[in-house]
Image (tube, rainbow, N blue to C red):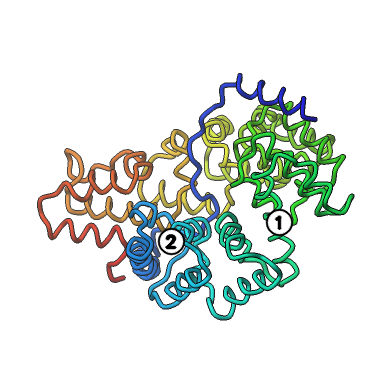
């Protein structure tokens, strides 16, 4: 098995990995333009208020950069600091250092929303009561804060032990001794052995720990796991990437026959099925019905099969988008904003953007500028979709908001962009 690992490493080093564009969130709730100003502005305003407070809190209390705080605020948002202050105080009272607390919140920010007295406190005290030292507790929770999201003392204790073994393995050269100390054939022994094997293969801890604290079958068993791991290594997946773990999950969960059938579904549609698997392993988890429904959705919107194939080639997650979202976003961008359908063929990634947080606010700014005659040579010239939706917030604001000398206009546009305007 270890010779396979070494061979896999060498073959992986020789490969030139393709760089893929970042996929945005794919499955978010969206709504049409007609309700954007009447209904969406209310939720946008409330959400933006909480987001702004959260960003200020993270910057002031934990020293995060504004960029990092804004990223975290997309995952958790609050408008008062009482509960968050209690959580931070609780961690400090248990000996967590400020860098450790920052790491915990950065990786698992939802803990700021958890009741410190009724939920977090009892869990930390339970781990201390069963023999964990203060230093072990702070180290393990800092490495894998999602442990504190587990319910039930038995489950919490079991996963704590799993993580503890792997962390101790990092400090020991005798891995076999660690595994042999566990009950042979037990679920714990299998999981620890398999995770340590993945660690030796080069899978980073950030990908290993989620496997440890879940009941996923990807690292359970022995013969099936080793067989699946060999296949994934031979296929050339890079063990340092999330795609390696995704591929292992798929191969572990599907028979060879089922995998081939799913690959053939893509092939029949005109795609290279194995290339699709190599680029996005998770797509093999989609059922044939879901794949065909996706095709029908795009065809029903007027896209040709060749156009759909082009879109998938440039943005494979198109296949994973829900029919409802595709229809809403495409309808909004084509019918309400008047971008030609061919624009979506050239820029399919925009269909993956969040309707509420990105598409609607930016398009509201563009509509306002057009109504005032401030865009392009004609005054109401619709800019390219890429300039409006694909640029970063900073680039968009510099190009369409901050460039104006009229401060009242800038303030009005910023209000529209942030969703703080009245409906």
The answer to whether residue 302 of the structure is visible from this angle is yes
In the picture as drawn, the residue positioned furthest to the left comes out as 405
Q: Is residue 349 left or right of residue 7?
A: left
Position in image of residue 92 (x %, y %): 47, 69
Count residues near mark 2 (Cα–Cα under 10 Å), then give few for <14, some for 14-19, many for 20+. Answer: some
Q: Is residue 184 left or right of residue 158?
A: right
Q: Nearer the viewer, residue 48 or 7?
A: 7
Position in image of residue 206 (x %, y %): 59, 47
Picture residue at 51% right of the left edge, 56% below the top: 107
Q: Nearer the viewer, residue 369 or 184?
A: 184
Question: Which residue is disc 1 drawn over?
Answer: 214
Position in image of residue 315 (x %, y %): 53, 36
Picture residue at 53% right of the left edge, 73% below the top: 114
Count residues near mark 1 (Cα–Cα under 10 Å), then give few for <14, some for 14-19, many for 20+. Answer: few
- Quarter of the image with the C terminus in it: bottom left
Position in image of residue 104 (x %, y %): 51, 59
């Amino acid at each position: 098995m270890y010779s396979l690992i070494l061979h896999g490493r060498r073959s992986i080093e020789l490969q030139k990995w393709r760089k893929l564009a970042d996929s945005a969130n794919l499955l978010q709730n969206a709504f049409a333009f007609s309700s954007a100003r009447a209904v969406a502005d209310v939720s946008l305003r409330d959400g933006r208020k909480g987001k702004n407070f959260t960003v200020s809190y993270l910057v002031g209390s934990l020293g995060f950069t504004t960029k990092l705080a804004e990223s975290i605020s997309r995952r958790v948002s609050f408008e008062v600091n009482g509960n968050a202050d209690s959580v931070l105080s609780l961690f400090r009272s248990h000996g967590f250092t400020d860098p450790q607390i920052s790491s915990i919140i950065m990786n698992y920010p939802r803990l700021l929303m958890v009741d410190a007295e009724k939920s977090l406190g009892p869990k930390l005290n339970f781990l201390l009561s069963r023999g964990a030292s203060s230093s072990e507790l702070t180290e393990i929770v800092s490495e894998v804060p999602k442990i504190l999201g587990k319910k039930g003392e038995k489950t919490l204790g079991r996963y704590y032990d799993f993580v503890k073994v792997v962390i101790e393995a990092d400090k020991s050269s005798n891995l076999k001794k660690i595994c042999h100390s566990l009950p042979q054939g037990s679920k714990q022994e299998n999981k620890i052995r398999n995770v340590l094997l993945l660690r030796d293969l080069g899978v980073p801890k950030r990908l290993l720990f989620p496997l440890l604290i879940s009941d996923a079958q990807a690292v359970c068993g022995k013969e099936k796991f080793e067989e699946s791991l060999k296949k994934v290594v031979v296929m050339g997946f890079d063990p340092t990437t999330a795609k390696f773990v995704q591929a292992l999950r798929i191969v572990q969960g599907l028979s060879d026959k089922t995998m081939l059938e799913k690959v053939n579904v893509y092939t029949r549609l005109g795609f290279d099925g194995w290339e699709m698997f190599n680029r996005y392993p998770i797509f093999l988890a989609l059922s044939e019905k879901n794949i065909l429904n996706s095709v029908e959705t795009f065809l029903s919107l007027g896209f040709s099969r060749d156009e759909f194939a082009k879109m998938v080639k440039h943005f494979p997650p198109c296949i994973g988008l829900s029919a409802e979202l595709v229809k809403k976003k495409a309808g909004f961008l084509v019918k309400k904003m008047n971008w030609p359908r061919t624009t979506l063929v050239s820029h399919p990634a925009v269909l993956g953007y969040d309707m509420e947080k990105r598409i609607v606010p930016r398009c509201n700014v563009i509509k306002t500028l057009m109504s005032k005659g401030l865009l392009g040579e004609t005054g109401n010239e619709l800019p390219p979709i890429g300039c409006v939706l694909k640029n970063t917030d900073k680039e968009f604001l510099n190009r369409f908001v901050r460039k104006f000398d009229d401060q009242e206009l800038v303030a009005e546009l910023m209000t529209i962009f942030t969703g703080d305007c009245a409906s």
